[in-house]
Image (cartoon, grey):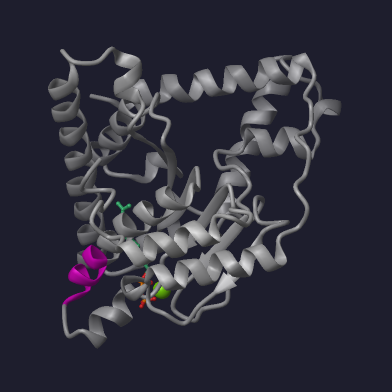
Amino acid sequence: MSSWVNENSVSFFQLFCIKVIKTGRIPQHIAFIMDGNRRYAKKASVDKKTGHYRGFDKLSETLKWCLDLGIPEVTVYAFSIENFKRGEDEVEALMDLARDKFQRLLEEMFERIQQFFYLFNSDQIRDWGVRVHVAGRLSLLPSDLRSLVSEVMLATKNNNKLRLNIAYAYTGRDEISRAASHIIDGVKNNEITADDIDDELISQSMELGEAELLVRTSGEVRLSDFMLWQLSDTVLYFTDVLWPEFSIWNLLAAIIHFQRHAPPIKPDKELDSRKETFLEHLENKRWQELAKNVS
Ligand code: FPP
Ligand code: MG
């Protein structure tokens, strides 16, 4: 995972500040709208593609900071369904970036597994990794990329150090529509009844869980159709910094903002066994779809 988690991005002083902040409450799920890559590119006199690559580098630094802060789940908005409307060259550059980075991730995983294969049992191997989930309408992706992201999800399925959700070919409304059709299928197949449909069942049928803190960079103060269902109780933090210039100090400021404004922790709701069974089937169906996508 080293190209995805920049191990060199924390100094001794920064680690000290992280430790101080960790004495307070830390969000268990943080979401980022990584905005401002093209404005950064203009400002730094580089092309848009380089702006997006610098955006990826910033993501890998941010993941290291989140790991050090003990944040177990991170969700990032990497490509919205609306982004397909951008120029052909830019869409292709963003798809190539994803191909490049996901391929690298798989190669690094296999290198590491080979390295450690004779030394540790498989449970220990699984201990270090980041679990990657790509959330979105994967049918909109070119087939090679769909196959690659499916492979990444299957390969990292048992990793447990941090869960990274990448919203790709994603909008919040589309995610709600997909959850609604899964629920309708469940009613049609008599797995659940119409009376079973409530906010908890809908929440559990979504691909993404609720985030406790949302950070949006670049001065835009909109949600842009991101995690609409999951942000109902979320602390929002907007900052003017462009995403490739986001620093650990911006992240720590966001966490302090969270500590000042966080609502009380909600207890988990219990689901009855029929709903549980429906959700298990849904989960299995999703894994089967992914396995089918891998060519
Ligand atoms: C928004 O900036 C950024 C994007 C549309 C792409 C974000 C992608 C990355 C940071 C790379 C992550 C990639 C993977 C595969 C995880 P913008 O283009 O809207 O810039 P602007 O607001 O200045 O116009
Ligand atoms: Mg933008």
| Above or below 68: residue 119 | above
Q: Quadrant of ligand 1?
A: bottom left
Task: Report the residue at 39% width, 40% height from top.
Answer: 138
Residue 59, position as x, y percentages in the image = 33, 58
Residue situated in front as seen by the camera: 3 or 120? 120
In the displayed structure, does residue 5 sit left or right of residue 204? Answer: left
Instruction: Determine the main secondary structure of the stretch shown in magenta.
Output: helix
Task: Report the residue at 35% width, 16% height from top.
Answer: 123
Task: Report the residue at 61% width, 38% height from top.
Answer: 206
Residue 45, position as x, y percentages in the image = 17, 85
Residue situated in front as seen by the camera: 50 or 11? 11
Q: Quadrant of residue 282?
A: top right
| Above or below 208: residue 186 | above
Query: Magenta segment: does it hold 292?
Result: no
Give the residues in magenta: 47-54
Q: Quadrant of residue 15?
A: bottom left
